[in-house]
Amino acid sequence: MQIDFWFEFASTYSYLSALRLPGLAAKAGVTVRWRPFLLGPIFAAQGWDTSPFNIYAAKGNYMWRDMERRAGKLGLSIHRPDPFPQNSLLAARVAQAAPEGPEMIAFCHNVYLAQFSERLEISDLDVIAACASAARLPGDIIAQSQSDENKLALRAATEDAIRHGIFGAPSFTVDGELFWGDDRLEDALDWAVRHG
Amino acid sequence: MQIDFWFEFASTYSYLSALRLPGLAAKAGVTVRWRPFLLGPIFAAQGWDTSPFNIYAAKGNYMWRDMERRAGKLGLSIHRPDPFPQNSLLAARVAQAAPEGPEMIAFCHNVYLAQFSERLEISDLDVIAACASAARLPGDIIAQSQSDENKLALRAATEDAIRHGIFGAPSFTVDGELFWGDDRLEDALDWAVRHG
């Protein structure tokens, strides 16, 4: 039983899922493959040059309040990054380059907490290097993340997301099914348990 | 403890909430005010001339599959209306004109089931008249719904929705808070219980 967890570092609701997922997946006995991808190219294909939360003001206002409520329930703080969305390319490349395992997950958590709790800019190389180091990723992970091969791998991951019908983050794929949004995390795990 | 339930007859997820709400609200001891409104003017203000589920193909494909899964869990069938979205103006005017009470709720259920289960067109006067009659609404409710006063009341309801920050349906308002989407129904009821 395995699900793919598709996340974008700049995505607010991906933050919640990234923090909630390890505990819930362990409880359900489901293996998770963490799959970083970029929403930028997907949004651009829809004619958007920024997050739809910026384009559609009422939806954006709602999202920030909803995040406050939901993060609050989880005991997480939610700071509104400036600028929003943050440039997540470096973080995504590092996550793509990182070997699967608890260090990679720790790195992802560190990036989300840096951005949404500690008010740091995740486009900043020093911030990402600190996140990687604290997660005990390999010392040369930043350099690895900048290889042509890794850049292409991240681009291929985004194309793979599109092939799966993904249009937002977080998303979960399992057994040919797509689930979109932090509020579908439990449904995705449940599907994996029942059909995996 | 009261919540306002904002619904659009053409909205797929409003169908689920409309059917789920009476039982859940009764269990929670929460009073519900049923508030029909129109998404058309709200979408038009965002530059959309149809549902975003038609404009954004990947999101639309996802929604129909998600509806199948969620309706299936509830034991409801989900048929894709043609055209989608249906013209919901007449149904909304009748709901606006109807006195609050179980007959009005029955009318709403009848309209949703006609549209999404029985494959009927809710722009059809005969369909809406049958929904009203089966719900035991007043015999002249169709005529009442066409009064200038009632047309203006529905327009005012949509403007009131916009003032509440509403941008989609279903939405729930309680205690100054907005909750959007069928998957926030339980949260809205919970807020009413804790803060109402």
Image: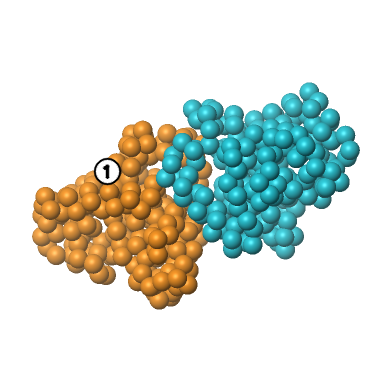
Chain colours: A cyan, B orange
- How many numbered marks are there? 1
Tell me what residue is drawn at x 60 percent, y 43 percent: A81
> Which residue extends farthest top?
A148
Tell me what residue is drawn at x 38 percent, y 39 percent: B51
In this picture, is A16 found above or below B23? above
Place of residue A186 in the rendered image (x, y in percent of width and height, measured from the top left): 61, 58
Considering the numbered disc 1 on the image, is that residue within a helix, a strand or a loop?
Answer: loop
Quadrant in which residue A38 is drawn? top right
Place of residue B36 in the rendered image (x, y in percent of width and height, measured from the top left): 28, 55
Of the pair B83 and A35, the residue shown nearer to us: A35
Of the pair A185 and B118, the residue shown nearer to us: A185
Residue of label 1: B87
The answer to whether any part of residue A56 appears in the image is yes
Tell me what residue is drawn at x 68 percent, y 49 percent: A118
Of the pair A177 and B180, the residue shown nearer to us: B180
Quadrant in which residue A40 is drawn? top right
A95 horizontally vs A66: left or right: right
Tell me what residue is drawn at x 40 percent, y 76 percent: B29
A193 horizontally vs B154: left or right: right
Place of residue A195 in the rendered image (x, y in percent of width and height, measured from the top left): 65, 55
Place of residue A33 in the rendered image (x, y in percent of width and height, measured from the top left): 74, 46
